[in-house]
Image: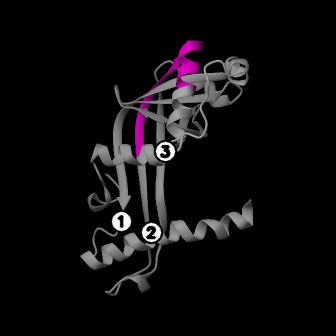
Amino acid sequence: MNYPPKLHQDNDKLHMIEVIKNYPLATIISVTDNKPLITHLPLIYREEDGKLIGHIDIYNPQANLLKDNNQLTVIFSGPQCYISPSIYTTTQLPTWNYIKVHLQATVEAIESKEALKQSLIIMTEFLEKPAHKYVLDADNPRMVANLNYIKMFEITITHWEGKFKLSQDKKPQDKENAKAELIRSNQENIRAFLDKVF
């Protein structure tokens, strides 16, 4: 059974790719001996073949599972917030709106140091958009010195699931109000939160 209900599922791959591009920090889940290993890493979507590219510290215990066509679950999280009934024009109950992308996938280690170096440069270039204030040079001594401590991997996506709970079951004006609340909440609440934890 699929959950959430079909109304809150988005099967448009282009929508899911937009989530990956705009919120690249992924939750990567492997299972070994019936125990999950979970790491949070940025992943870059490679347009030409639809693979996800990432890097992991060799001392991370999950690094040993990111090879040999092993299976993974990968989750990308977009914006989310509580939706108060007070924002609606109609009588509703409190709810939570969110955007998630769940992927089933397989993974392969890439052993080439040159490929690793190029992928680090490409990832930095992508993450520096749009201002590109920093460029990672191929001969950067710090990067070169750390290549032996980083593993590169490629993820092949085998199943896509978009979970977009965005008040789709509400009237058009209430949907717009929920969208505005999602924007407002994500923009305004972050400063107060960071002041408490940073």
> Does residue 66 appear in this view?
no
Q: Position of residue 116 (x, y in %)?
A: 57, 19
Are circles 3 and 1 on residues that touch, CB within 8 Å? no
- Magenta part of the chain: 102-120
Q: What amino acid type should be assigned to the residue bearing mark 1?
A: Leu
Asked if disc 2 and disc 3 are in contact, CB closer than 8 Å, the reply is: no
Helix, strand or loop at disc 3? loop
The spot of residue 37 in percent (x, y) is 61, 37
Q: Give the Cα separation between the discs numbered 2 and 3.
A: 24 Å
Is 31 above or below relative to 154? below
Q: Secondary structure at mark 1?
A: loop
| First reached walking from the N terminus: tag 2 or tag 3 | 3
Q: Is residue 45 visible?
A: yes
Label 2 sits on residue? 182
In the displayed structure, 70 sits above or below 167; it is: above
Is 4 drawn above or below residue 90 in the view shown?
above
Tag 1 near tag 2, CB within 8 Å: yes
Residue 75 in magenta stretch: no
Residues packed near mark 1 inside 10 Å, few (<14), some (14 to 19) or many (20 plus): many
Mark 2 nearby-residue class (10 Å; few <14, some 14–19, many ≥20): many
What residue is pinned by disc 3?
A: 130
Circle 2: residue type: Leu
The residue labelled by disc 1 is: 166
- Left or right of 181 on screen, residue 109: right
Tell which of 166 and 134 is nearer to you: 134
Name the residue type under label 3. Answer: Pro
